[in-house]
Amino acid sequence: MIPKADTLEASNIIKEGGIVIYPTEGIYGLGCDPLNSDSVDNIFQLKGREYDKRFIILSSSIGFLNGIIDSSLGDDARLNSNDFLTWIVPANNNCPPWLKSKNNVAIRITQHPVVVDLCNKLQGPIISTSANYSGQKYINDITIIEELFDGKVSCIVNGKLGDEKKPSSIIDIISNEVLRG
């Protein structure tokens, strides 16, 4: 059985390089510290994900994305909207290469209370990817997810899923092109 944890325990696990399963607006996600290359690599390996497919970075605040996104975006009101949107934005020059794709990063400012609390306790963002293996259909049943990842993640963060029934839309902030509707 994967241990359950509150957001404070989970934030400490993430700070120490661990991987957690946590509820988001609509799915359970796998997360870690996006600035810890070993942790991010562990998620790639755990999911069996190709390294050219990057992850979304979730944050409770645009301020936690300093050093990841281009500093000129800090005042862009679209990023702080309450809409369930993931944005493809220009990366900061200091952004780690494992987070970038074509010098862009995918970010979402979350409204989910568990993820907000987790990021606030971390004082930073987290990696977000669905809690499933690459190429496999996603199952939104925490009991099955727990069986799939037993012994492979550090904890499951206590909390309930949000009400979203589909993944977030993904929009390129520069071109306004909708990449996923």
Image: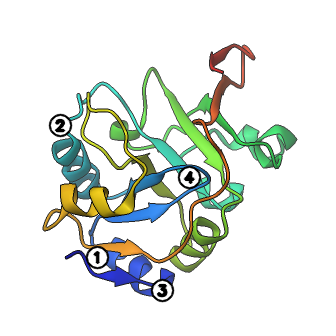
Label 2, on which residue? 48
First-in-chain label (4 vs 3): 3
> Which secondary structure lies at badge 1?
loop
Label 3, on which residue? 8
Q: Position of residue 141 (x, y in %)?
A: 39, 55
First-in-chain label (2 vs 3): 3
Q: Amino acid at mark 1?
A: Glu
**Distance in Å between CA atoms under marks 4 and 3:** 17 Å
Q: Name which residue lies at 72% across and 20% down.
A: 174
* The label number, if any, that marks residue 16 in the structure image: 1
First-in-chain label (2 vs 1): 1
Q: Quadrant of residue 55?
A: top left
Around disc 2, counting alpha carbons within 10 Å, would you say few (fewer than 14), some (14 to 19), or many (20 or more)? few
Q: Amino acid at mark 2?
A: Gly
CB-based contact (under 8 Å), mark 2 and mark 4: no
CB-based contact (under 8 Å), mark 2 and mark 3: no
Quadrant including the C terminus: top right
**Distance in Å between CA atoms under marks 2 and 3:** 29 Å
